[in-house]
Image (cartoon, grey):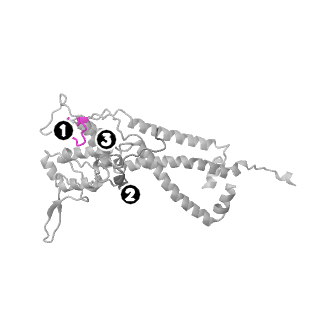
Amino acid sequence: MISRFLYRYIFKRTSSFILSIVVTSVFFERAYDHACEEIFEWINEGRLWTHIKHKYDNLPQTQSYQKRYIEERTSDLEEIPNEDTKED
Amino acid sequence: MAASLGRVCKFGLLKSNYGTLFNQLLACLGVTAGGISALIYALDQSVKASDQVAHPPNYKWGFYGIFSSLDHRSLRRGWEVYKNVCSACHSLDFLAFRHLVGVTHTEEEVKAIAAEYQVQDGPDDTGAYYMRPGKLFDTIPAPYPNEEAARAANNGAYPPDLTYIINASENGENYVFSLLTGYCDPPAGITLREGQYFNPYFVNGALGMPQIIYNEVIEYADGTPATASQVAKDVVEFLMWASNAEFDERKKMTIKVIGFGLISLPLIIYWKRVKWTTVKNTKLLFTPKYKRQ
């Protein structure tokens, strides 16, 4: 079933085969590099510049504008108890 | 050539079941190559007792693991050590301020550090050279303008440039660490001239640099206790980075290469088996002419 699908739409024509190679290599390389970077940072936890940068960086550049906007407006909100779970 | 070789060897070279001469030749070559390699290895592993120098021990550096990066907290302290201690005599010619960005300091911090230095620039409109505060693209200013000035200021000894000192000396990181922490009184029989200091790790022992790394020689901004070994370790790690700026990238590439090798190995094995299955399953049959009819 799946092999027939693969053959009909990908391997049968050279053009679609080449296109599939290009597309998968783009996504594979992106994902693979990201995974390797994660492993590297996990092995060297606390030793890399990215792990100590926040101590010397005053600008919260990693925080997006949207996230800051939400946090500024929700920080003073009180927690409202849920009506359903309230005990009588 | 091939014909004469065949005549001499009686086609022995081409036959797998009658290749005694070839096999003997190969065995001789193998034994010779192996022997020479073993000799070279043995000579390299010898005790090296003929030199008048102490050999540094191998310390357990944090960056020795095959996936281990440099410790950037240590690099940051190492820059402090270089700036406050080493830079009085040693230059760091091949390093620019911009190289520190994203490694030890943020861009704003490096701009502030660079602005503390005065750098010669010019010529201006009148053709004169002038001094201006350092910028990110400047190389780190050297303490002396040239080698002669450095020698004149240091009793004729030339403080070497430290950028590639770790790669330039054998077993670099251990040697520099041992040299910095290994000063001691000269043993009997060794006389030192004025301005020379005894260090067993330096060839012939007489070093032009006095011991400058002591406990509490500087105070770290991050509060790490500045023991002599901590200071030496930090500056050696910093110089390791100066010599090998691509160190962390190399370790990351190791992970990538090993990972991709593991992915592609089964594929290559499968591909080989696919290609060889025809060869391995082919049966050759020889029928003599008189039986063929």
The secondary structure that most of the magenta stretch takes on is: loop
The reply to whether discs 1 and 3 touch (Cβ–Cβ < 8 Å) is: no
Q: Nearer the viewer, residue B174 or A1?
A: A1
Q: Are marks 1 and 3 on the same chain?
A: yes
Type of amino acid at the residue the image marks with label 3: Glu
* Residue B214: quadrant of the picture: top left
Type of amino acid at the residue the image marks with label 1: Val
- Viewer can see residue B42: yes
* Residue sitting at x 38%, y 40%: B64
Q: As drawn, is B231 to the left or to the right of B254? A: left
Type of amino acid at the residue the image marks with label 2: Gln
- Badge 3 is on which residue? B173
Element type where label 1 sits in the image:
loop
- Badge 1 is on which residue? B217
What range is drawn magenta here? Answer: B210-229
Q: As displayed, is residue B65 above or below residue B131?
A: above
In space, the residues marked 1 and 2 are separated at their CA atoms by: 47 Å
Res A66 label = 2
Q: Quadrant of the N terminus of chain B?
A: bottom right
- Viewer can see residue B96: no
